Image (cartoon, grey):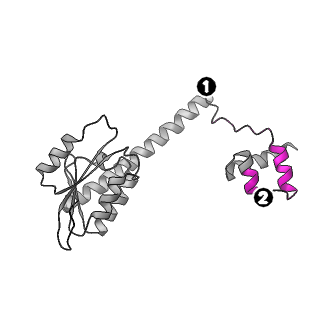
Amino acid sequence: MKQKLVGDNIKIGYVRVSTAEQNTMRQEVMLQELGVEEMFIDIASGKNTERPQLKKMMAFIRRGDIVIVESISRFTRNTKDLLEMLEILSTKEVTFISKKDAIDTHTPTGKFMITVFGAVAELEREYIRQHQREGIEIAKHQGKYKGRKRIKSPDFDKVVARWRAGEITAVKAMESLRMSRNTFYRRLKEFDKMI
């Protein structure tokens, strides 16, 4: 990686593949043809931004730089992460170009496309949630959906008795039962109704 000087604006490429079996060469060649001077390559899932080379790139960029990717899906698969990263780039006055998606945030059309992309992705997520809810309702009516398996805690009453006696804290009770705070208090309500 070359040392950057203040005012030394460059084109930076980001390449990502999900597994070592996938080849990065096609993306690398395309970015080199676009005049990229510095390249960051991750072999990792795009489900979140916890990628070493992505982090290095985000720390490396400076005002006036141009970040180029083959497609938005190479940059991230999560719309929320995409919009957050684009906000960081915008704050640093860095242009983002997605070649395959024909998006350039330096242009009004590019900015508009990012906004539309975010809205469409949000709409898709809402449709997926709606379909899941509808599917669950149908499965419930057919007696096929039972929900998540309940955490079995045969010692629940003993642990609760110790907690109520002040022998252990609520946190210790939750830890020993391996329950989240919400599950613990929900079970406690159910338990109190039974006695």
Residue tagged by mark 2? 169
Direction bottom: furthest residue: 6
Q: Is residue 188 left or right of residue 124?
A: right
Residue tagged by mark 1? 142
Question: Disc 1 marks which amino acid?
Answer: Gln
- Dot 1: element: loop
Report the mark closest to the observer, 2 or 1: 2
Question: Disc 2 marks which amino acid?
Answer: Thr
Would you say residue 156 sits in the magenta stretch? yes
Please determine whether, in this image, residue 56 is positioned above or below residue 31: below
Density class for disc 2 (Cα within 10 Å; few <14, some 14-19, many ≥20) is some
Q: Is residue 58 left or right of residue 187?
A: left
Residue 185 in view of the camera: no
Density class for disc 1 (Cα within 10 Å; few <14, some 14-19, many ≥20) is few
Q: Position of residue 96 (x, y in %)?
A: 24, 58
The residues colored magenta run 148-174
Q: Position of residue 186 (x, y in %)?
A: 73, 48
Q: Residue at the spot x=74%, y=45% of the render?
A: 177
Q: Position of residue 11 (x, y in %)?
A: 18, 59
